[in-house]
Image (cartoon, rainbow, N blue to C red):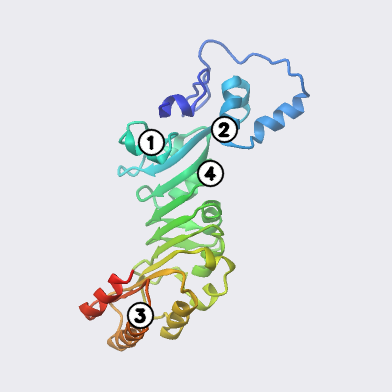
Amino acid sequence: MGASSSIFASDVVPTFYGKRAWPGCPTKKHDWKYPESMIHYIAKNPSSTKVYQKMIQSGKYFFEKNPVLVVSKLDTCKDNVNSLICSNTVDECKKNTEKCCVKIDIAKVFSKIWITDKLSVTDGAKNFTSVFCSKLYRCEIDFLGICRKVIMFDDLLLFTSSAKKILLCDNQIIFNEGKPVMLNTILESSPNVTIFFFYFDDGASTVNTSLKNIMKLKNLGKIEYFGLHNLSESLSIEDISAFLKKSEHVRIEFRFSKNISDDYKNQLDALIDEIIESKAFNRLIVYDGQDREKYKTMKNRL
């Protein structure tokens, strides 16, 4: 079933913009076998996307009371205005070369959005996540990718609570009062994460890093891959060493910015020697100008 037919019920064709328009005739009054209050509650609180789809296919009443677009994925477009949404699975969408996707302007969507698999925000306005969250009904995604955005932490919580794969690149992540968010706080709010990638912005990052606090997290045992890129030398070598030893089950990749000092590079090189001599696997430390043979040795052990 294509996106345009499965997003909407067969007898429900609402417009994305403005007031809903029913083709043919207005909604008919139903004679329910149950109290109106119970039907209203069911309409407002569907237990799953499958239940919701069956409800709106059974009658216009349910969509009218709770207009929701069920989509599996959303990708922002390079025009920085529109997004592509699809109701097919990610694999089905790939097979269809995204011909099943529908292009929409999220800011003008009337209905709420229930997203179930993938959210990829690499284009669009700086405040795209806040705009999207204002339209969000439920978020049950497996994959989250956001780049170059200003993200309020309360909005981020809506995404990270379900995501298993999280990629955050060059973002500013702040609390409502403007204070920076600690990296361990982001990880703590991601109870299901198994793959975590974070690329720090080039300036003074709004996300502080504390490996000591990260090592205390209960969900650290679930993580399979942990990558931090564009790191500054504010990260303690002792903390990096302790983190590597504690997280033997994790594939770890630390890449440092180009402007770290020679003294810090020497400290990193000593740690790299220790990693190589211990014959440890799944550890990669990268900095500009490092010994290529040592790099290859770590790379081959991933």
Return the residue found at the far top: 24
**Nearest-to-viewer mark from 2 and 3:** 3
Find out whether the residues at labels 1 and 2 contact each other: C-beta distance under 8 Å. Answer: no
Residue 160, percent across and down? 52, 55
Return the residue found at the far right: 35
Residue 156, percent across and down? 51, 55
Disc 1 residue type (three-letter)? Glu
Residue 185 in sight here: no
* Residue pictured at 53% horizontal, 67% vertical: 221
Pointer 3: what residue? 279
Report crowding for label 1: few under 14, some 14 to 19, many 20 or more residues within 10 A (C-alpha). Answer: some
- In the image, 208 versus 256, the foreground residue is 256
Q: Locate residue 25 relative to residue 228 in the image: left or right.
A: right
So how many labels did they put on this image?
Answer: 4
Report crowding for label 4: few under 14, some 14 to 19, many 20 or more residues within 10 A (C-alpha). Answer: few
* Residue pictured at 36% horizontal, 66% vertical: 201
Q: Quadrant of the N terminus?
A: top left
Q: Is residue 213 placed above or below 192 in the rendered structure?
A: below
Pointer 4: what residue? 134
Disc 4 residue type (three-letter)? Ser
Give the spatial CA distance, label 1 vs label 4. Answer: 28 Å
Mark 1: secondary structure: helix
Give the spatial CA distance, label 1 vs label 2. Answer: 18 Å
* Residue pictured at 43% horizontal, 38% vertical: 89
Q: Earlier in the sequence, mark 1 or mark 3?
A: 1
Mark 3: secondary structure: loop
Give the spatial CA distance, label 2 vs label 3. Answer: 50 Å
Pointer 2: what residue? 50
Query: Could you say which disc has been placed on residue 92 in the image?
Result: 1
